[in-house]
Amino acid sequence: MIYFRSDYSQGAHPKVMEALAATNFEHTDGYAIDRHCEHAAEMIKALIGRPDASVHMMIGGTPCNVTVIAAALRPYETVIAARSGHCYFHETGGVEATGHRVTTVEPFDGKVTPEGIDFAMSEFQDEHTPKPAMVYVSQPTEIGTIYSKAELGALRAKCDEYGLMLYLDGARLAAALTCGANDLTIGDIANLTDAFYIGGTKCGALFGEALVILNPKIDDHFRWMIKRQGGMLAKGRLIGVQFEALFEGGEDSLYFKIGRSENEAADRIRSALTDLGIKFLGSSPTNQIFPILPAKVVKELESDFFFYEWAPEQDGMIPVRLVTGWGTTEDDVEALITRIKELI
Amino acid sequence: MIYFRSDYSQGAHPKVMEALAATNFEHTDGYAIDRHCEHAAEMIKALIGRPDASVHMMIGGTPCNVTVIAAALRPYETVIAARSGHCYFHETGGVEATGHRVTTVEPFDGKVTPEGIDFAMSEFQDEHTPKPAMVYVSQPTEIGTIYSKAELGALRAKCDEYGLMLYLDGARLAAALTCGANDLTIGDIANLTDAFYIGGTKCGALFGEALVILNPKIDDHFRWMIKRQGGMLAKGRLIGVQFEALFEGGEDSLYFKIGRSENEAADRIRSALTDLGIKFLGSSPTNQIFPILPAKVVKELESDFFFYEWAPEQDGMIPVRLVTGWGTTEDDVEALITRIKELI
Amino acid sequence: MIYFRSDYSQGAHPKVMEALAATNFEHTDGYAIDRHCEHAAEMIKALIGRPDASVHMMIGGTPCNVTVIAAALRPYETVIAARSGHCYFHETGGVEATGHRVTTVEPFDGKVTPEGIDFAMSEFQDEHTPKPAMVYVSQPTEIGTIYSKAELGALRAKCDEYGLMLYLDGARLAAALTCGANDLTIGDIANLTDAFYIGGTKCGALFGEALVILNPKIDDHFRWMIKRQGGMLAKGRLIGVQFEALFEGGEDSLYFKIGRSENEAADRIRSALTDLGIKFLGSSPTNQIFPILPAKVVKELESDFFFYEWAPEQDGMIPVRLVTGWGTTEDDVEALITRIKELI
Amino acid sequence: MIYFRSDYSQGAHPKVMEALAATNFEHTDGYAIDRHCEHAAEMIKALIGRPDASVHMMIGGTPCNVTVIAAALRPYETVIAARSGHCYFHETGGVEATGHRVTTVEPFDGKVTPEGIDFAMSEFQDEHTPKPAMVYVSQPTEIGTIYSKAELGALRAKCDEYGLMLYLDGARLAAALTCGANDLTIGDIANLTDAFYIGGTKCGALFGEALVILNPKIDDHFRWMIKRQGGMLAKGRLIGVQFEALFEGGEDSLYFKIGRSENEAADRIRSALTDLGIKFLGSSPTNQIFPILPAKVVKELESDFFFYEWAPEQDGMIPVRLVTGWGTTEDDVEALITRIKELI
């Protein structure tokens, strides 16, 4: 069985595992206050050119999202997100569990739009309606699409118009930053948002995300918030060690290499399927692609390949999700393309 | 610097690291639904003799505590705990963040007593007072003491008298089960509680705890609760892999060996210090000991050894906490004892 | 200034005030456990033909909604409501404050539809998505429209298909039950829902709503829930006394008389405006009507009449909300109609 | 049956009822934004000499407490209260329902002490422990005792030392301000606290409390908080009308008259019982007294008088709570004293 199921179906990239092994016998203090976490934070601040940033080593993506939102909002405030956004759609109400609404807007190609923000703000009237205070986006989105620099800038401008914070979930940020269609640097993202996180889990780490807070208001007693929300890791240095391994070398580091290799594998599949006349859901240029295949082909493929059916069959067709990861090999990609060609 | 700071200052026991390396390139589905998590769960169910148990691979101790409590209680219900209990004292209000009170009782030698439960229940009167529904204990307690079989049985009986659930936090369960004073088997604990967890983080894992739910009421949609509370790990199999390594061999497994080695190191220190006439806070027979040392000795020791001062200086004396871990060596222990002898 | 602003702009109907005055010097126990509350509950149970119902005297509509929802749902569960529904749109996130999502669906003529429920359920997939457990509707809706018996029956059937509870907010239930288009009895509503409330505030009481719980699961320790959510009134008997006054005489009681008089006033306005060729938002047959008037007319009217502009001006027209109350007089209605005729 | 059960067993003082009747047919806008609420607020600001205060008309005491605490605290913060304090002991976990701990301290004569605050702060250490941010007291306390000016000043100084806010629950403030032992003016209270409320329910109103916020931080979007917490009354003017009636005349107003009459009745009972050699729980100088009576006397008294047994029988004695209200008559008091004299 060959996996195109997700970019977290294997363990860690070998270089990350090496770093964990090399530091395994060191003693450090717990809870992500140690030399590795500090060093990783410094590397990230240098990379984004923001020495004023506050960087926290987080245990996972949902804890990032929920903790940032709970820290940033007053009780009567809400966060605006696409109805398809991860913090709304795939976190089992984690935001609401902290007492806050996710005010949903309809996405366009997976993305929040300035018009969506206008709509959400039009619903806010007075003390009978909760007040949006933040916009949540992910880069890439749930369907792999990315915001251009102009699009993210337009969201920033719209947020400023209404006094909203802008938070970016970068679970797969490596794939976004290294895909052909991208025109945003990680420094741009730091400058356009109030906070964002750099995902490790889906880029070769065992687990762990690096949260970057640019707006000091969000950073207030943030370590208290991490602990309260259950996201503080005893052996916190493990996250620091992994991010050291990922970002050693800055823009030439493993982090960007993994992003590129994921995208290259996806590009080959995308290109081959396009040549076959296959259509896709959304315009993803990153490592998640959503070809719409004949149901019969899908069922045959499932004998040898493991992936998600993304939506129910309609008119004999099923959109599927194919994801490439750090460990996806050329052989995996060839096998998939060959098999689809046979079946079409 | 030699660490007696905590049992989570190093990475994982070499055998745990080996298991992670050996399985690193496998592909599995995410979120702790995979063969390793299933196998580890089966091993644990066999060990405790409870095939009916539900075992969940959890990311950490606080997520265990908070998720169990939030899953078990109705909104108007509370959990009774010692004022010194971890879920009250060291989780930054994580339980209250889910809307529930921790009803505190005064501990005796770190432990909840039947009289404490009587007291808490005496405060519950009618619809103006929240209703206790669960008792939280940890084995060992925050000060390393342990419940005997008779004591845990008495708590169970008292819980039954009031219709309360009993939940046991086993962050350091290995140390409790393998210390000289212990008369409880892990099977006894399963039979006396509604849920408990077997701590991995403080017993040689990188992270991870195995939560064992015996009362089906608590298990209702528990995976929804894990996700909602932010505790679901994408590469969930990592926890399963580590628990396979820890429990391979059942009662002769690494888990119990680590517990024994931690206790042996602590026993040697305890014994040597007792011989020097040093007194201790509490009666801990496990791998955390709390000698009360002259302030001057403490300050000298701190040049070479890293540990917590447990309470402020009083009458020239300071209680300190010394913790042994899976990586504590005989040399570490010797060095500590020798240095204290010199200083006393 | 003549008020068509709301049905709660005046105090209580004179007969309600009389009842409060007549019982003012009585001593009773507090918190809605007294002979008046008990008697009012018995009257309501008789009226709806459900001696098994549990009736609670509540302080207001939002406390009803929030307390019922918080009592009924498990933490990982949500309530489905129209995006325009009161519990979503006009309660400042009160539901989310208890940790639960309101899963919104698009309304049709203000109403939740079976297709809307299908849509909401299609979003629920597994432990990564919160689970809808209840449907919230109001009768009439936020725009005064009503569910027919067939429509409410279809919602009940759809709820049963998915195992959902059905809760009905009856803030203006009197207006719904007594309007010309209605074919539902209050007994039908009791038989089709798991809980509903009979609104007093908007039907001649100073305040207070009678919550009727038919599903015992929701009623678990409900008084604890009322107190926890801040909705327990010390002099709780006041609500009982008012409902005694409202329901004395059963189907001929003041409650239904007020409903009818509110509707008659609205009918006269609706009819006169329709004759003038004025169009309306929605198809409300109850005491809230939403004529779409030329902006210039609206501005002129505002000199003498107090009402809400319901939406921003568009193409020179403004939809306004006109509401009639227990105290709306024939003269008020005549004055309004006359003035609009002059202005059109 | 003669009631010494509570000060809320009857309806409203006749002058309050008159005010409600006199304004009943007026039309006003809803939600406590109207001329009566504004006027009542102005009267209160003048009385306390703080034109900068923000005054909110609240529906009840628990909504006051919970809303103030939820508005004032950041998510990781707690409120310190006596274990016997109302917000901890008699509000069914309403504070915890908003995600915050009540950090309890042992009371002395029902009161929070500076030493208690020191103790609570000693438990706060770092990001693993929630951070106290406010102290909750009530004047009088749950057992009727009062803080002297020196005592409240000492609490204020202690709060300032730690950067804590001080909030005072004045459910029975009239009784405190008018009792013989009091040396605090209502202006002093305004100057020593960050917020306090003036209780109406227990001083002759049907319901309603006037919340006075002195610290602008607490007042941030406070009406959003009121609505979110379910405490916003549609016919909000009713509270304003009642407080106008209570405070007409300032320091000679009905509010203080009722306080005095309640205390005088209590004083007569206290004095008569003291003459009989009866002892009391606590040193209450206000309208709640707690004589410790022989169990047999208590049981006999219960044939004719309605009151609470405050604690279980011990050594043949039962402490009871006797409360006088605005409607307590001289005859009621005489009857009680006479009967006790007969029984002793």
Image (cartoon, coloured by chain):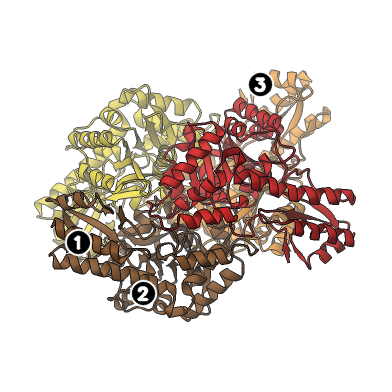
Chain colours: A red, B brown, C orange, D yellow
Residue at (64% x, 32% y) in the render: A121
Amino acid at dot 3: Glu
Query: Left or right: D342 with respect to C51?
Result: left
> Height in image: A34 above or below B76?
above
Q: Dot 2 surroundings within 10 Å: few (below 14), some, or many (20 or more)?
A: many
Amino acid at dot 1: Thr
Assign a secondary structure to mark 3. Answer: loop
Residue at (65% x, 48% y) in the render: A258
Query: Left or right: B195 with respect to D168?
Result: right
Residue A52: % across, % down: 48, 31
Assign a secondary structure to mark 1. Answer: helix
Amino acid at dot 2: Arg
Q: Viewer-proximal residue, A114 or C110?
A: A114
Q: Viewer-proximal residue, C72 or A110?
A: A110
Residue B213 visible somewhere in the drawing:
yes
**Label 1 belongs to which residue?**
B338
Query: Left or right: C278 with respect to A231?
Result: right
**Label 3 belongs to which residue?**
C302
Q: Earlier in the sequence, mark 2 or mark 1?
A: 2
In what quadrant of the picture does the C terminus of chain B appear? Answer: bottom left
Residue C174 visible somewhere in the drawing:
no
Q: Are marks 1 and 3 on the same chain?
A: no
**C-beta proximity under 8 Å, tags 1 and 3:** no
**Label 2 belongs to which residue?**
B156
Q: CA distance from mark 2 to mark 1?
A: 44 Å
Mark whose residue sits in front, 2 or 3: 2
